[in-house]
Image: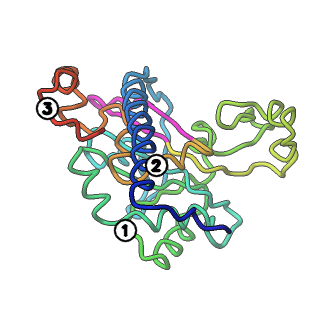
Amino acid sequence: MSLPKIVTQEEWETARRALLAKEKELTKARDRLSTERRELPMVEVAKLHELEGPDGPASLLDLFEGRRQLIVYHFMFHPDWEDGCPSCTAGTSELSAGFLDHLHTRDTSYALVSRAPLEKLERWKAEQGWQIPWYSTNDGDFSYDFGATIDASRGYDEFNYRTLDEYAAMGRESMKTSEQPYDMPGRTCFLQDDGSVFRTYSVYARGLESTGGSYYFLDLTALGRQEDWEDPKGRAALERGNAPDFAT
């Protein structure tokens, strides 16, 4: 791997300013996209999904833990596996107690959901030292309905808004020919209002890589970061120059 070119301080500052302009452009584009995401229509979850947690049977509403929003990570853990997916494990290990606390202050819960039996999830969770709530679907419909488990024989033949036939046409035949059912990673956001649960957003594949700290996770939700700059009046203040534009 080659190293960057060596230049003078003046040349470095010129190149850095040019890159900064592109970074600001990307940040503003991301903010516009986050606004569109918050305005995405939502759909009510009518099915009574029952999962299993450390305290016994749990409904989807229970996963909110009394908060307004819920982010679910579809953790790849096949019922036949003894260990969790290495990639999902690596990503989850980066989530600290402070991350969860920050989400909670924004009225948002976070949970892992997998198809494997609860005892396997609890063992893997203990080995990793995690405190994140983790629930088993016991191979129920939850992971299938929200696009994280593929099984064409049961009518679940899409991933990331493409059919398995479309993947095959793109040269990714393994998406169709691999032994089913199989799991894929994903993240789904929910909002609850007066006891009714709504799906607001789901993201899979490369889209999972676009998140960083808790702010970026909140950007996936319907209520967002819940700060002044997201409000139309707050955005107007930024545009008039009456508030510091920290985002740029």
Q: What label sits on residue 131 in the rendered view?
A: 1
Task: Indicate which label's residue lies in the foreground, 2 or 1.
Answer: 2
User: From which residue to which does the magenta span run?
Assistant: 188-203
**Residue at the (63%, 41%) spot, across then down:** 144
Tag 1: amino acid: Gln
70 or 55: nearer the eye? 70
What separation in Å lies between label 2 and label 1 (alpha carbons)? 44 Å
Find residue 138 and report its horizontal and vertical position in percent: 59, 54
Q: Residues within 10 Å of mark 1 (few under 14, many from 20)?
A: few
Tag 3: amino acid: Ala
**Residue at the (54%, 67%) spot, across then down:** 90
Horizontal placement of 192 versus 4: left or right? Answer: left
Q: Are marks 3 and 1 in contact (CB under 8 Å)?
A: no
Looking at marks 3 and 1 on the same chain, the residue that comes earlier in the sequence is marked by: 1
Task: Indicate which label's residue lies in the foreground, 2 or 3.
Answer: 2
**Residue at the (80%, 44%) spot, across then down:** 175
Which is the main secondary structure of the residues drawn in magenta? strand
Find residue 64 and report its horizontal and vertical position in percent: 33, 45
Quarter of image, res 226: top left
Image position of 114 with respect to 120: above or below: above
